[in-house]
Every structure is written in structure tokens, then in C-alpha cells.
Image (cartoon, coloured by chain):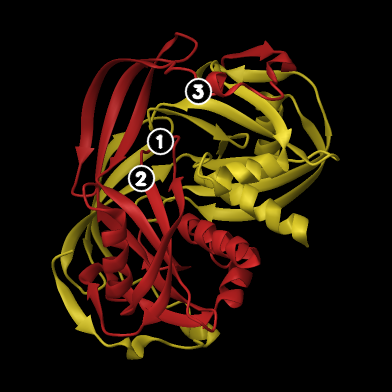
Chain colours: A yellow, B red
Amino acid sequence: MKQKKATSTNRVNPQPATGDRHPPNSWKTLSSNEKYSNPWIQVTEYQVLNPAGKPGIYGKVHFRNKAIGIVALDKKLNTWLVGQFRFALNEWSWEIPEGGGPLKTNVLTSAKRELKEETGLTAKKWKLIQRVHLSNSVSDEEGFIFLAEDLSEGSSYREDSEADMKVWKLPFKKALKMVLEGEITDSLSVVGILRVAKLLEE
Amino acid sequence: MKQKKATSTNRVNPQPATGDRHPPNSWKTLSSNEKYSNPWIQVTEYQVLNPAGKPGIYGKVHFRNKAIGIVALDKKLNTWLVGQFRFALNEWSWEIPEGGGPLKTNVLTSAKRELKEETGLTAKKWKLIQRVHLSNSVSDEEGFIFLAEDLSEGSSYREDSEADMKVWKLPFKKALKMVLEGEITDSLSVVGILRVAKLLEE
């Protein structure tokens, strides 16, 4: 945040032509070093020339899984939230059912597995409603959010890291209220619930 | 994803009492080791006992800044997008104006600075519209999204890492369409734009 240059607002382009909207990569990578790796993430430091041509470093977190989230909606417009203590935040979090799906696995296959594992639900109707990049200043984590309908209830199968998980069936309206009032903060959940609220208006 | 145990859906709690909704931390930390650090992130590996009491590791990415995003809205319901090549994604991304704010700096102060730096805009009316945790399976990154109104245009001051940045003033409706059609994927932007769409309905 130190080296800055003044630029005038004549860069504001009221309606860029499509061809002009995706300029080429303006970062140059000189070298890279893996700094940390575990089954979920890989951290690499790159020596770069930034878009102004100046040398610097970029620490990137590569995710070994896609983030998969599911908004389940029954005929009475109930949805399912999952609560768990999030280690990285050091706090409890209510969220839509979600989890990691291997990069090479079809995202719908992962979504069906996650929903069943965490809530016991199976769904006959699936729709991909949003793709998001969760934290693009540092990571390449890609999230896929589905709407699951035409539901049947059954048994769930949790992972050990999810042994404290709680499941809550509640009116979708109440979940939306929790987003609007800041009680749900997980980004995949906020996006999924706001997106389904928009779909329900259409 | 290997060790699982079957649980019945009788854990589904139709309406948990408030006191029951935030159980205590079910992770135990045994030790920790810093694995990587730069001015933006710190990566630490923790030896833990997971919620089932089994030993394991947890790699956590601590962010040294808060993520700040701003949806700017003028009287004619235009908004401003910022486009840049995202190194971590290796692709171009259209987003709401956003950037990092130091952890100890007031988020509104950071939001005013970011909006001015990237777009040249100043705003007389500010509202915090959403707080999000961007990637809580791995990081503690916290995002704050503001709605900025009653705008004045001026000069912008970009950082060197933003030398390729493009600014685009466009109808808010068009930005919303870009979210709904998957052309905007940055999570802070998707949340901000969907949230403002909801506010505009009220």
C-alpha cells in the first residue's frame, strides 16, 4: 500500500467492448517454491513482476478440493442448516450443508454425497445455482452451490471431524433472516441462501 | 473422508433452543508450528484432537488483513466494477471495489480509502450490509461489505499491483445480471450485489 500513482478517472469505461474486457495476464512469474503442503492445501511462494513491472512475492494457497454447498428445499419451503465449531475461526457456525469435493470428481456427485453424509437427505431435482471463487486474493478455491429439491429423508454418515455437527430443519425464510441479520456468516451459505431467495421471487 | 460412522437423523432438531445453538469448542489443540509467513498471510500447522477425539493435523491460513468490499450506488442506480487479472486464479475477474484493510483499522476507514483509491469516488452515505467469513474450512479471513451512496467523482490512486486495473461504471441491474449469469464469481462481489438487490426490493 505504499507505492501508488495518481490516475485520472478517464479510465472509467462506460461500456467496454467484450474483446477489451479480458486483457491478458499482467503478472510475470520468475520462480516458485512450495512452502507447505497437506492433504487439503498447498502453499507456494512465487517470485513475480507485478502489473507495474516491479519485483515482489506472491504467496498462493492452492486448494486440493472444490468447495461444495447445497441449499435443500422441501415442498413446504423448509431448508436444512448444519452447525459445527469451525477450527479456523475458533467459533460456532451455522451453514448450509457443505464440504470438499475432489478436483477431478464431478461437482454434482460430490454434492449428492455431502448432502447425504451431513443430513441424510437425498434429492431427485438438482440445479447448480452459483459458482464462486471464495478468496481470490490468495487462493484458487472454487465453490459450487446447488439447489436440491424433491427430497427424501434417510440416515446420515458423518466424518470424524464432523462428530460435533448439528442439523437443523427450519423454514427457508428463517434461514434468510439469519443471513440478513448477520447470524450466518459463511460465504458459501450467504451466497446460496441469497441466491435461492432471488430464485423464489422469479 | 474415510472414517465415518452412521448416525440417525434423530439429530435433526426442528428448533434448537438458543442456548443449545452454540456448543463449546470440540477441537483440542496439542501444539502448533508456523510453516510460512509473508506480509499478507501466516500458515500454521496445528496438532489436534478432532471432535471425535482422534489425533490429526489442521493447516490454518491466518489473514493479516480484513477483506473490504464496496457496492457504490448513484442516484440513477449505476454501480462501479473493477476488473483485474487475479494472480491466484490465473484469470481476469470483474469485482466490486475491494481490498485489504489492516486488522486494527476501522473497517469503514478502510472502505473509504479503497473506494477512493480504486475508483476516485467519495461517498457521504455508508452502510455496512454484510459480514462474511470467506473460506472458513482453512482460513480466518473476515470480509465486510458496505453500500456507499451520495457519491462524488474524483481522482483515483492505484497501487502498483493494481496497475492493470480497469474501472467500469454500469447500471446496477447489469451487474446483478452478471452475477446471476455467472460472469462475476468473486464471493465478496456476489454477496454484495445479491445483498443490495435484496435491499432495493425493500
Describe residue A113's horizontal placement relative to residue B162 as left or right.
Answer: right
At mark 3, the secondary structure is: loop
Q: Is residue B128 above or below residue B70?
A: above
Q: Residues within 10 Å of mark 3 (few under 14, many from 20)?
A: some
Secondary element at tag 1 = loop
Q: Amino acid at mark 3?
A: His
Percent x, y for residue A104?
58, 42
Outermost residue, left side: A2
In the displayed structure image, the side of residue B87 where residue B136 appears, left or right: right
- Where does residue B202 sit, x and y in percent of width and height? 64, 63
Residue at 17 percent of width and 74 percent of height = A4
Q: Please say if B46 is above or below A49.
A: above
- Of residues A90 and A162, the one drawn nearer to the viewer in this rendering: A90
Disc 2 on helix, strand or loop?
strand
Q: Residue at x 40, y 36 (%)?
A: B138
The Cα–Cα distance between marks 3 and 1, rounded to whole angstroms, is 20 Å
Could you tell me the amino acid type at mark 1?
A: Val
Q: Which mark is residue A61?
A: 2
Q: Is residue A132 above or below residue B8?
A: below
Residue B150: name its quadrant.
Answer: bottom left
User: Which comes sooner in the sequence, label 3 or label 1?
Assistant: 3
Q: Which residue is mark 1?
A: B138
Question: Residue under circle 3?
Answer: B22
Compared to A37, does B86 lie above or below? Answer: below
**Mark 2 vs mark 3: in front:** 3
Tell whether B54 sits left or right of A175: left
Mark 2 nearby-residue class (10 Å; few <14, some 14–19, many ≥20): many
